[in-house]
């Protein structure tokens, strides 16, 4: 097989691995063979004062060596530190990270030399989110020698395909994990649904959320998160998100509800902030927070039949509950239904009993979750 044919074969298996994570060991083996390496790893890197590798798959490494590396040596690794400070550099190798003389004096390489005969490294990376890097590292022994310019040139031929394959694989993994975490992600949902990772970055937004982005009425969405126009509302939202993150995925941790006023003067948004349990899967996107936003101005039909079925409400109670779920105040909901405020209060007491809630904020949280499900 010619060099060109081998390169094409590697490119093909990279895209295959993007669609099926079980193929990554084969993809790493193909890369090892193509580049004259002795080992390889596929990784995601979360940058912080203590960087970590939440996903780390290897080929041709001893498990004990890898476990020891992940447990204590990642923050000391000069290549990891270089990647943290140069997230947009596509190809990184020893020659730009550390000199051979400095390697001999560095505690990380002292440890590595006592654990493995691996000595040289070449890395191809991409940055799928502002806080996560992903890539492949190739390794050579001291006996085989460093990666030369022709090795870097050959690796550059496939780096663009590696970058796209990683982006595809991580994106598909994110969507799969999101769908497993909650059934409320389908675009037909009337509520705006956002999933945030542990850094408060948005990793999923449904069609209704994109419509909110376009309306620009008090809610600003970007890849880096969600911001409300009014500072008091935004401060409260960020506090709720931080509270969820402090216990995300823990049993018994419930969500919180708030209202957010709008510059247009239209009725306030209803916002539910709730945790998502940790999900397995090969993905750099780890949804930790679900935010459900309802807009009382856009809901054209109220699914009161769903509330009747879910909680055993009467039709009158379900109609009131559905209005409350859209952010209506009890007094205004009573006026819209043509009943007195006293009657609305009495129905609300019955709704509390049937939904096993005690406060209106708790009730709205339960209702928003129910209404958001497809």
Image: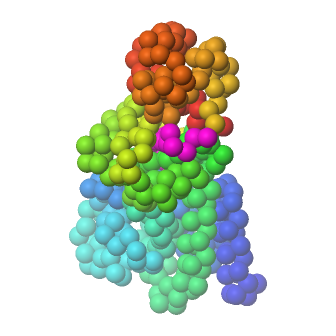
Q: Position of residue 153 (x, y in %)?
A: 53, 88
Query: Compared with residue 144, is residue 212 higher up or lower down, i.e. above or below?
Result: above
State the scheme by which the image is colored: rainbow
- Give the image quarter of residue 1: bottom right
Task: Looking at this view, name the residue that lies furthest to the bottom.
Answer: 150
- Give the image quarter of residue 267: top left
Q: In terms of secondary structure, what is the magenta stretch mainly?
A: loop
Instruction: Say whether residue 71 is left or right of residue 350.
Output: left
Q: Position of residue 371 (x, y in %)?
A: 59, 32
**Residue at the spot 37% in from the left edge and 34% down from the top edge:** 258
Q: Which residues are magenta?
A: 285-300
Instruction: Say whether residue 305 is left or right of residue 342.
Output: right
Residue 18 is at least partly visible in this image: yes
- Give the image quarter of residue 76: bottom left
Q: Position of residue 206 (x, y in %)?
A: 57, 51
| 163 in the magenta segment | no
Instruction: Say whether residue 283 is left or right of residue 255.
Output: right
Numbered label tally: 0
**Residue at the spot 26% in from the left edge and 62% down from the top edge:** 107
Residue 64 is at least partly visible in this image: no
In this view, the residue in front, 53 or 374, is 374
In this view, the residue in front, 366 or 144, is 366
**Residue at the spot 45% in from the left edge and 78% down from the top edge:** 91
In this view, the residue in front, 348 or 142, is 348
Quarter of the image with the C terminus in it: top right
């Amino acid at each position: 097989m010619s060099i060109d044919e081998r390169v094409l074969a590697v490119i093909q298996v990279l895209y295959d691995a993007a669609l099926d994570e079980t193929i990554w060991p084969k993809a790493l083996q193909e890369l090892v063979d193509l580049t004259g390496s002795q080992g390889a790893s596929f990784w995601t890197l979360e940058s912080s004062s203590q960087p970590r590798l939440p996903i780390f798959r290897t080929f041709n490494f001893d498990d004990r060596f890898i476990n020891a590396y992940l447990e204590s040596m990642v923050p000391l690794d000069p290549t990891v530190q270089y990647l943290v400070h140069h997230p947009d550099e596509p190809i990184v190798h020893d020659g730009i990270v550390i000199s051979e003389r400095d390697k001999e004096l560095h505690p990380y390489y002292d440890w590595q030399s006592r654990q493995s005969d691996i000595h040289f490294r070449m890395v191809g990376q991409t940055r799928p989110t502002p806080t996560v890097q992903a890539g492949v590292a190739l390794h050579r022994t001291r006996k085989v020698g460093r990666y030369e310019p022709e090795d870097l040139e050959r690796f550059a031929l496939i780096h663009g395909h590696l970058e796209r394959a990683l982006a595809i694989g991580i994106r598909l993994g994110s969507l799969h994990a999101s769908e497993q975490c909650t059934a409320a992600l389908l675009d037909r949902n009337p509520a705006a649904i956002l999933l945030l990772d542990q850094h408060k970055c948005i990793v999923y937004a449904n069609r209704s959320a994109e419509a909110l982005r376009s309306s620009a009425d008090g809610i600003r969405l970007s890849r880096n998160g969600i911001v409300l126009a009014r500072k008091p509302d935004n401060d409260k939202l960020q506090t709720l998100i931080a509270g969820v993150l402090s216990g995300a995925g823990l049993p018994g941790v419930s969500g919180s509800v708030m209202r957010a006023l709008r510059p247009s003067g239209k009725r306030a948004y209803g916002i539910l902030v709730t945790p998502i349990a940790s999900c397995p899967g090969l993905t750099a996107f780890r949804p930790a927070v679900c935010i459900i936003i309802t807009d009382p101005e856009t809901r054209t039909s109220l699914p009161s039949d769903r509330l009747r079925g879910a909680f055993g409400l009467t039709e009158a109670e379900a109609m009131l509950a559905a209005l409350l779920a859209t952010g209506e105040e009890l007094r205004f909901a009573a006026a819209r239904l043509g009943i007195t405020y006293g009657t609305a209060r009495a129905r609300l007491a019955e709704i509390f009993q049937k939904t096993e809630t005690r406060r209106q904020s708790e009730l709205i949280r339960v209702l928003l979750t129910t209404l958001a499900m497809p």
